[in-house]
Image (cartoon, helix red, strand yellow):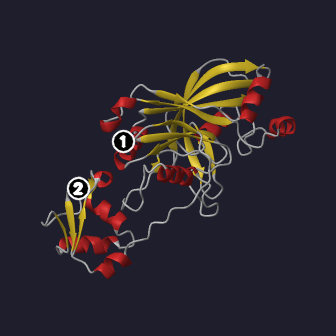
Amino acid sequence: MREIIIKENESGQRLDRFLRKYLDKAPRSFLYRMIRKKNIELNHKRTKPETTIYKGDSIQLFLADETIEKFRTEIKIVKSDLDLDIVYEDKNIILINKDIGVLSHGDGRSSGSSIVDGMVNYLIEKKDYKPEVERTFTPSICNRLDRNTCGIIIGAKNYQSLKIVNEALRQSHIHRFYKTIVYGIVDEDFQDKAYISRDKNKNITKVSKESKGNRQEIQTKIKVLKTMDKFSLLEIQLLTGRTHQIRSHLSYLGYPIIGDRKYGNKSINDTLDKKYRLKYQYLHGYKVKFQKLEGSLKYLNGESFESKANEKYLNIEEDLFN
């Protein structure tokens, strides 16, 4: 028999979800059968898969050690030399300013070069995360940005913070703001609602005013910061968070983002590429504002954090808008 004492980073989740992480190779049907046959107990009593477990609870696995190890994946930490641009950090969260060309999550091909890899290694070096002690939790990011979009990534350093931030993002209680430069003059601030569909094979989205089919509603808030000649510097607030929402929505509205090779104006992009070597969309997730966070993260309510774009983007902005 193996006994597992639940720790802080495992507390507050369903028993079956914990088991699916602890015995990650085990079929779900096997776990449910073991619970039903009392080969898995909670606090030495019969239990159910949906029972919530808390810090200090004990789980008894009446399974052979060979069976347990067969169903467990060895934890492997990918080494990373990524130099993180940290905007803010406390005991619960870390905000990282992701640069252009850096992946949010690893893709299996560029080992050690993602924000997740860099964050985990950084926290190990600080001894804020000890993989030899943790059994089911690894620090994780709560939002992601396209490879060629820069801006703030929210990282959670413990399980409770991960749950709170993810729920706040689902409820739109964390406001995310982007800066972008578009081709065209936007005369005034406005908010637009439309519907978006995605072609996963081509990794492209299409926006429409009609809601039919599998289209999802999107809402985008647009604030004019500066205009000059044929260009507008905008602040975009995501009220919904869909794949390529800002890029696709602005293009649909007639204001394509400069440098955007999927949704932009090819002629303008080619001209700006020759002048500035602008290869990607000018889109920077520069600010996050926290509201209505629950539990251990209440202290962040009302706080906002900003990050700077890279030097090339700042130079383009200065040149286009004096």
Residue at 42% over, 49% down: 128
Query: Is residue 296 positioned above or below 306 on the image?
Result: below
Residue at 25% over, 78% down: 63
Amino acid at dot 1: Ile
231 relative to 170 in the view: left or right = right
Quarter of the image where the N terminus is located: bottom left
Query: Is residue 105 positioned above or below 269 on the image?
Result: below
Q: Secondary structure at mark 1?
A: helix
Q: Which mark is residue 67?
A: none
In three-dimensional space, the C-alpha distance between marks 2 and 1, rounded to whole angstroms, equals 17 Å
Pick the residue in front: 138 or 104.
Answer: 138
Q: Secondary structure at mark 2?
A: strand
Q: Which mark is residue 53?
A: 2
Mark 1 is surrounded, within 10 Å at the Cα level, by few (under 14), some (14 to 19) or many (20 or more) other residues, namely some
Write down the quadrant of residue 194 in the picture: top right
Q: Which mark is residue 164?
A: 1
Judged from this view, the residue extending furthest toward the front is 126
Write down the quadrant of residue 66 in the picture: bottom left
Measuring from the top left, give residue 131's x and y in whole percent: 42, 60
75 relative to 315 in the view: left or right = left
Measuring from the top left, give residue 174's x and y in whole percent: 44, 34
Judged from this view, the residue extending furthest toward the left is 45
Residue at 69% over, 25% down: 233
Pick the residue in front: 18 or 224.
Answer: 18
Dot 2 or dot 1: first in sequence order is 2
Measuring from the top left, give residue 130's x and y in whole percent: 41, 56
Query: Is residue 275 positioned above or below 321 on the image?
Result: below
Quarter of the image where the C terminus is located: top right
Amino acid at dot 2: Ile
Write down the quadrant of residue 303 in the picture: top left
Pick the residue in front: 281 or 95.
Answer: 95
